[in-house]
C-alpha cells in the first residue's frame, strides 16, 4: 500500500472526484496537506454501487493526520481513505453535510446543535453512528477544565459565585461545545448569562485573552491547558463537576449510509477506527511521538494528548439519546437554543454490528481499562 501526499489542490490522476475535492478545499481551513491511504490505483466514485476498490472514504479530522497515519489502522483497507484536516468543527460538519466528508469525529452536542434548524420533514444530512465517553470522569476528565486567569484572583467555585464588582468575564465561543459548558457551570452556581459578561471569541483568541487577563474564566481541554497553568492560570474544576456528560461521536453522511457499497466501506472504516483507538491506548510513546513530529506538539502536550484520547466506545443507546434530549431542553431553558426539537433521528444503528464485532475482536474495552492502571 502506498501513502500519497497531496499539496494544495494538486489533482491525482484518474480522479472523477475533483469537484468534490475542490469544494472540500474551499471548506477546510487547513487544506495544505491531505493524506491518501491507497490500496489501489482507481479513484472513481461509487454512487450506484460497485467494488470497494472504487470507493474513497473521506474522514474529517481536527488537526493533522500524523497520528492516524502512524497507527497503520487503514493501511490494508480495500478502498482509499482520505484524511481531511479542519481547524473548526463547523467546517467539518459543513463538509459532511455537503457530502464532501463521509465520517466526522466531533462532539455530539455540536452536531445536534447544528441540526436544530432542520424542519420535521427535512432530511438529516449526517447521523451519529457511535458515541465516545470519558470512562472514568471521577479519576480523569479529559474533556475540559474551568480555568481562571492569574489576574482574576479566582481559585475556587465559591470565588466565582461570590464575585463582586464588575461582571465576571466568561470566555467561550458561541454555538460551540464551550457554550453548553458555560451554561452548565453557571446553572450549577445558581447564575445565568445575565449575571456575567460573555466574551465571544474563537479558540486561539480566547487563549490570548486569558493570558492577558482580558477574561476571567473559560473552559479548556485537558491536553491544551498546561501552558496556561504554567503561566499562572488556575484550574478551578473539571466539567464533570457541573453534571455534564461530555460525548463525542463519529458522524456519518446520511447519503453514504444509503449506498450499499459505500456503506460496506464505512462499516470497515469504523471497525478500523476501533483498531486505531486500540493502538492509541497500547502505544503511548508512539502516539506522543506522532503528535510531536506530525503536529509540532511539545513533548508534555503530546503526553497529555495521549491521556486526552482515551474514551470508551458505545453504541447509540436509548440512555445516550435521552441524555442528548435533556441537553436540548436545558439549552432552551437557559437561552442557548431558541426552541426544542426531537434528537432521535440524528442517530443511527446502521453500524452497530460492525462496531460490536470490532470491539470484541480488538479487546479495546479491556485494553482501555488497563491503560488507567
Image (cartoon, helix red, strand yellow):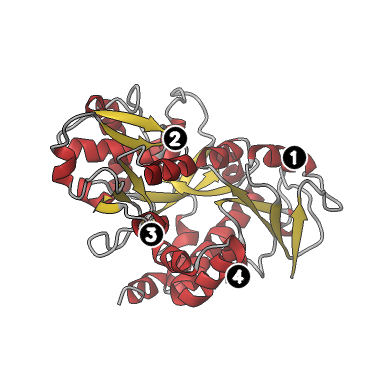
Q: Secondary structure at mark 4?
A: helix
Vertical position of residue 355 compared to residue 26: above or below: below
* Distance CA(mark 3)–CA(mark 1): 37 Å
From the top left corner, tell me how far across and down residue 277 is, in percent.
48, 66
Residue at horizontal 47 percent and vertical 38 percent from the top:
202
The residue beneath circle 2 is 201
Kindly indicate the quadrant of the structure image that contains residue 201.
top left
164 left or right of 246 in image: left
Q: Badge 4, how many Cα within 10 Å: few under 14, some, many 20+?
A: some
Q: State how far apart marks 2 and 1 are (Cα).
A: 29 Å
The mark nearer the N terminus, 2 or 4, is: 4
Residue 303 image point, x, y percent: 44, 69
Residue where numbered disc 4 is placed:
70
| 333 w.r.t. 140: above or below | above
Nearest the eye: 229 or 9: 229
Q: Disc 4 and disc 3: Cα gap in Å?
A: 25 Å
Q: Quadrant of residue 140?
A: bottom left
Residue at position x 62%, y 66% from top? 69
Choose mark 2 or mark 1, whichever is in front: 2
**Residue 156: percent from left, percent from top:** 18, 49
Q: Nearer the viewer, mark 2 or mark 4?
A: 2
Residue under numbered circle 1: 22
Mark 1 or mark 3, which is nearer the start of the sequence?
1
Mark nearer the N terminus (1 vs 4) = 1
Can you see residue 37?
A: yes
Q: Are marks 2 and 4 in contact (CB under 8 Å)?
A: no
Amino acid at each position: 500500500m502506498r501513502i500519497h501526499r497531496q499539496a494544495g489542490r494538486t489533482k491525482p490522476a484518474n480522479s472523477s472526484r475533483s469537484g468534490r475535492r475542490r469544494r472540500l478545499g474551499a471548506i477546510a481551513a487547513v487544506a495544505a496537506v491531505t493524506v491518501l491511504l491507497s490500496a489501489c490505483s482507481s479513484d472513481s466514485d461509487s454512487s450506484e454501487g460497485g467494488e470497494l476498490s472504487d470507493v474513497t472514504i473521506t474522514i474529517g479530522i481536527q488537526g493533522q493526520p500524523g497520528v492516524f497515519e502512524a497507527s497503520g489502522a487503514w493501511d490494508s483497507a480495500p478502498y482509499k481513505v482520505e484524511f481531511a484536516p479542519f481547524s473548526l468543527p463547523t467546517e467539518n460538519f459543513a463538509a459532511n453535510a455537503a457530502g464532501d466528508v463521509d465520517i466526522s469525529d466531533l462532539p455530539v452536542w455540536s452536531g445536534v446543535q447544528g441540526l436544530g434548524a432542520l424542519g420535521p420533514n427535512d432530511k438529516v444530512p449526517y447521523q451519529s453512528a457511535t458515541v465516545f465517553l470519558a470512562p472514568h470522569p471521577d479519576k480523569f476528565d479529559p474533556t475540559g477544565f474551568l480555568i481562571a486567569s492569574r489576574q482574576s484572583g479566582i481559585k475556587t467555585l465559591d470565588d466565582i459565585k461570590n464575585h463582586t464588582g464588575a461582571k465576571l468575564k466568561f470566555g467561550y465561543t458561541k454555538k460551540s461545545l464551550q457554550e453548553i459548558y458555560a451554561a452548565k457551570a453557571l446553572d450549577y452556581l445558581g447564575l445565568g448569562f445575565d449575571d456575567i459578561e460573555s466574551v465571544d471569541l474563537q479558540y486561539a483568541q480566547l487563549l490570548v485573552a486569558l493570558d492577558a487577563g482580558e477574561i476571567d474564566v473559560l473552559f479548556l481541554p485537558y491536553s491544551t491547558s498546561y501552558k496556561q497553568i504554567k503561566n499562572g492560570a488556575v484550574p478551578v474544576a473539571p466539567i464533570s463537576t457541573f453534571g455534564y456528560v461530555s460525548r463525542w461521536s463519529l458522524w456519518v453522511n446520511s447519503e453514504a449510509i444509503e449506498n450499499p457499497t459505500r456503506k460496506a466501506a464505512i462499516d470497515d472504516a469504523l471497525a478500523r477506527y476501533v483498531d486505531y483507538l486500540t493502538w492509541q491506548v497500547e502505544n503511548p510513546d508512539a502516539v506522543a511521538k506522532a503528535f510531536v513530529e506530525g503536529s509540532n506538539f511539545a513533548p508534555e502536550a503530546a503526553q497529555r494528548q495521549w491521556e486526552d484520547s482515551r474514551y470508551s466506545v458505545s453504541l447509540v443507546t436509548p440512555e445516550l439519546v435521552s441524555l442528548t434530549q435533556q441537553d436540548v431542553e436545558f439549552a432552551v431553558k437557559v437561552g442557548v437554543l431558541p426552541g426544542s426539537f426531537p434528537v432521535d433521528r440524528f442517530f443511527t444503528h446502521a453500524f452497530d454490528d460492525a462496531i460490536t464485532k470490532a470491539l470484541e475482536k480488538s479487546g479495546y474495552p479491556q485494553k482501555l481499562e488497563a491503560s488507567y492502571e
